[in-house]
Image (cartoon, rainbow, N blue to C red):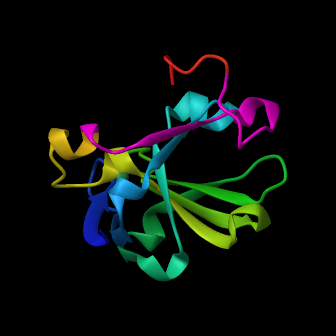
Amino acid sequence: MLKTYFGSCHCGDVTFAAEIDLAEGSGRCNCSICTKRRAWSVIVKPEDFRLLRGADKLSDYQFGTRSGHHRFCSRCGCAPFGDGHIEEIGGDYVSIAVACLDEVTPEELAAVPVRYSDGRNNAWWDEPREMAYL
Ligand SMILES: [Zn+2]
């Protein structure tokens, strides 16, 4: 069920709201940046995301094909969301860090289905051989 969630970076300078159905599932991935960030994300359409505060505090990191903006708070370093355009997933997207959602109980988080992607081998639709460490 779609629900409005609020989220923030660690210091609170960046806050957002998003319409998310956590039961639809989340993703973990073994690509270079997801591994180093231990990313755990849900994907929403841009119209379901609102940056509430902190546009001036966000830094942007891009690499490779530069199709994604890996945004992070310039004060605390936390990465509450990123955005970009990937044709294969329907174009424009916002990727929200599940760990940055506020007022979500451990029980709710534990119930979120997780899909694993083998981004390291550019095989996003396959599961990696090892997943336990992600
Ligand atoms: Zn911050």
Which image quarter: residue 101? bottom left
Which percent across, then down, holds residue 2?
Answer: 32, 72
Which image quarter: residue 12? bottom left
Residue 1 as seen in the image, left or right of residue 58: left
**Part of the protein shown in magenta:** 110-128
Query: Foreground residue, 28 or 6?
Result: 28
Which percent across, then down, holds residue 76?
Answer: 37, 45
- Return the residue found at the far right: 65
> Visible in this render: residue 73?
no
Height in image: 52 above or below 30? below
Height in image: 32 above or below 10? above
The residue at 42%/57% (across/down) is 24
Q: Give the quarter of the figure containing the N terminus.
A: bottom left
Q: How many marks?
A: 0
Q: Is residue 7 magenta?
A: no
Query: Foreground residue, 125 or 13?
Result: 125
Residue 31 as seen in the image, left or right of residue 112: right
The residue at 79%/56% (across/down) is 66
Q: Is residue 122 magenta?
A: yes
Which image quarter: residue 30? top right
Residue 72 as seen in the image, left or right of residue 91: left
Which percent across, then down, holds residue 6?
Answer: 26, 65
Which percent across, then down, holds residue 93?
Answer: 60, 68
The residue at 44%/44% (across/down) is 77
Query: Foreground residue, 109 or 38?
Result: 109
> Visible in this render: residue 11?
yes
